[in-house]
Amino acid sequence: MKNILIVLCMSLIIVSCKNNASEPSTKNDDGKVVVPKDVSPGLYSNPINTGEYSGELLNVGDIAPDFTINQGQENEWSLSDLRGKVVYIKFWRNNCSNCRISIPFLVEKYNTINNEDFIVITVTSNITENVSLEQTAQFIDDYEMNDWINIYDGETKETSIFKNYSIFGTPNGYLINKEGIVVKRIYPHEESFISTVNQELSK
């Protein structure tokens, strides 16, 4: 009888551990627990800003302004759905020579880190140069950027993620921690890029 009780107790402990070993979660701005959402790599368009615009460059400690893709559709997702992941959001433009130099560094660093909890989002805009979605897709193919999330931003300054993040020059990029907070303004060519990302992943 004693052996049966021991076996039953051990079984309950194992089941409890399995239930507690579910996907990592964190809390959103409303205090609700959020399980990180898997968002497929690819090119997305028509983002909707749902977070507050601060009117100035983001600082360390700020909550990264939220935005939503595919609003009202079955495959809708938001930046805040990625809580629990470390996110690097990079802003670039097709005619920006420094962006063209920077992107291969990002491809290399992303492949080196190779962690499913590290999400890269690159955002481009056609505000100043009238670059089409098709041209952007071709650029993404040419620069081997298909392994992460790419966003073709709004067509006006009022609707763009660029405006909500006060981006006036490119390239530009922010590392966002698992709680959705900006931890650093950083660039892929920096030697500390990988160690900084891995430090956040380990938390």
Image (tube, rainbow, N blue to C red):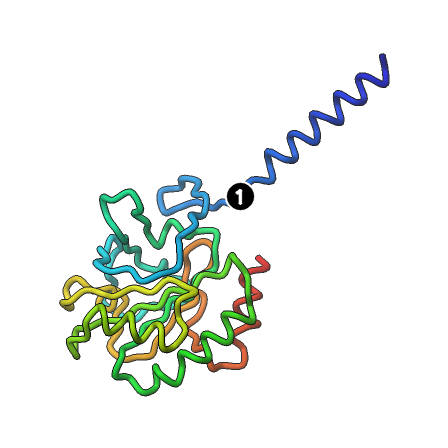
Q: Position of residue 39 (x, y in %)?
A: 40, 53
**Outermost residue toward the right in this view:** 2
Q: Is residue 188 left or right of residue 168?
A: right
Please identify the quarter of the rendering in which residue 34 is found. top left
Question: Is residue 181 shown above or below 4?
Answer: below
Q: Position of residue 163 (x, y in %)?
A: 21, 67
Of all residues, the one furthest to the bottom in this rendering is 97
| Residue 166 location, quadrant | bottom left
Which image quarter is the C terminus in?
bottom right
- Which percent across, then down, holds residue 172? 34, 76
| Image height of 20 relative to 173, above or below | above
Split into 4 quadrants, where in the image is the N terminus? Answer: top right
Q: Residues within 10 Å of mark 1 (few under 14, many from 20)?
A: few
Location of residue 197 with respect to 172 vertically, above or below: above
Percent coordinates x, y for residue 192 in the rendering:
54, 77
For the point 59% across and 33% down, which residue is it? 19
Judging by the rendered image, the residue that carries numbered circle 1 is 23
* 38 relative position to 99: left or right: right
Residue at 28% in and 67% down: 165
